[in-house]
Image (cartoon, helix red, strand yellow):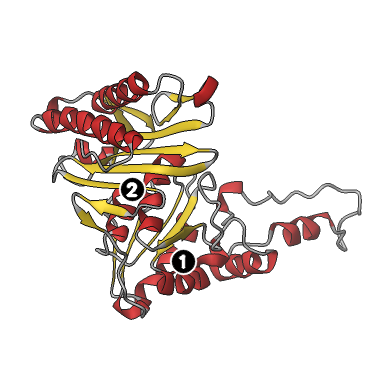
């Protein structure tokens, strides 16, 4: 490993490359990989588990008292001097791509210290592309310093996203967001690995990114790459404390504000007025208004008679 890199980043790179070697070997015969479904359209393979094991083994060999927060094996806190250190791991981001032989997937490892991301590695084993960053020292792709793109007009921008795919995901809400974004930008892409999407944004390959339903291990490493490359990242309303909020928006500074202006009303943290406006646009009845109408007496009913109309289903509401 390079001597000028932070020692903890060097260890993370070693772990990512070890996981990448496992992934590349399995990719040679992907049809033989055992696959299980965590839930509908959400898969885990023996490769995810083997890659995660080697990452954790490598990290704990160097830092046995550090905490681990990994997609497949869960979270365990650090101890002693390492109590404030937490490694956030996605051993194979883009599992669905991987099991189809679609070469867009990566290893994502981040170190959080006192609640802030300090080290980040996103490794694309199929291309041998190593994205890494240390807080305050910049972001790199292999040996090249990264800077976000300089485009300022949305019409010139390429934006990446992720489609909803789990049961219960709000497809109507997402399609409304996509309807707002697509006519205003040069193009929209859906590669299928959020960590790599953020790495590509940091490299200037794309200009913006938005997605819902993300977990901390999907975005932790990528978030530091973006900020160290001069970009901004947060939730849809622009707030920076987004890691566990399951919504993420990132872009270069000039484009970021424009995307927040478009997508902020779709945030779970949007104002009540914005949420009501989105419901009206989507044609979803206001739950409070319906409840009031159901409770109000009519000519043919007593005030005490229970309402017979069914309440709207929870998964029909946009928030």
Residue closest to the far front: 3
**Residue 45 in the image, given as x and y percentages of width and height:** 27, 27
Camera sees residue 215: no
| Circles 1 and 2 in contact, beta carbons < 8 Å | no
Quarter the N terminus occupies: top left
Q: Count residues near mark 2 (Cα–Cα under 10 Å), then give few for <14, some for 14-19, many for 20+.
A: many
Camera-side residue: 286 or 251?
251
**Residue 61 in the image, given as x and y percentages of width and height:** 33, 19
**Residue 191 in the image, given as x and y percentages of width and height:** 26, 53
Q: Vertical placement of 257 versus 84: above or below?
A: below
**Closer to the N terminus: mark 1 or mark 2?**
2
Instruction: Determine the image quadrant of residue 279.
Output: bottom right
**Residue 180 in the image, given as x and y percentages of width and height:** 43, 72
Quarter the C terminus occupies: bottom right
Camera sees residue 181: yes
The residue under label 2 is 133
Q: Is residue 255 left or right of residue 241?
A: left
The residue under label 1 is 176
In percent of the image, x 50 and y 67: which residue is there? 263
In percent of the image, x 87 and y 56: which residue is there? 301
Q: Count residues near mark 1 (Cα–Cα under 10 Å), then give few for <14, some for 14-19, many for 20+.
A: some
For mark 2, give the secondary structure: strand
Instruction: Determine the image quadrant of residue 229.
Output: bottom left
The residues bearing labels 1 and 2 have C-alpha atoms spaced at a distance of 34 Å
Residue closest to the far left: 28
In percent of the image, x 68 and y 62: which residue is there? 286
């Amino acid at each position: 490993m390079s001597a000028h890199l932070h020692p903890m980043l060097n260890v993370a790179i070693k772990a990512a490359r070890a996981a990448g070697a496992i992934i590349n070997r399995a990719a040679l015969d992907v049809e033989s990989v055992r696959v299980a479904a965590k839930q509908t359209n959400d898969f885990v393979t023996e490769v995810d588990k083997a890659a995660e094991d080697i990452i954790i083994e490598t990290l704990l060999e160097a830092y046995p008292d550090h905490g681990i927060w990994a997609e497949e094996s869960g979270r365990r806190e650090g101890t002693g001097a390492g109590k404030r250190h937490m490694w956030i791991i996605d051993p194979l981001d883009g599992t669905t791509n991987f099991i189809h032989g679609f070469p867009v997937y990566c290893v994502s490892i981040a170190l959080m210290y006192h609640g802030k991301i300090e080290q980040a590695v996103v490794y694309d084993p199929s291309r041998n592309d190593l994205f890494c960053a240390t807080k305050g020292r910049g972001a790199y792709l292999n040996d090249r310093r990264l800077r976000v793109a300089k485009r300022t007009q949305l019409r010139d921008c390429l934006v990446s996203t992720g489609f909803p795919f789990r049961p219960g995901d709000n497809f109507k809400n997402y399609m409304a967001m996509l309807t707002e974004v697509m006519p205003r930008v040069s193009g929209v892409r859906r590669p299928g690995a959020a960590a790599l999407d953020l790495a590509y944004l940091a490299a200037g390959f794309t200009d913006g990114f938005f997605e819902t339903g993300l977990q901390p291990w999907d975005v932790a490493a990528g978030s530091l790459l973006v900020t160290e490359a001069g970009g901004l990242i947060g939730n849809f309303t622009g707030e920076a404390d987004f890691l566990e909020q399951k919504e993420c928006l990132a872009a270069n500074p000039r484009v970021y504000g424009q995307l927040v202006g478009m997508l902020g009303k779709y945030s779970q943290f949007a104002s009540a007025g914005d949420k009501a406006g989105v419901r009206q646009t989507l044609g979803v009845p206001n739950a409070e208004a319906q409840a009031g109408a159901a409770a109000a007496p009519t000519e043919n009913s007593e005030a005490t008679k229970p309402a017979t109309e069914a309440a709207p289903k929870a998964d029909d509401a946009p928030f």
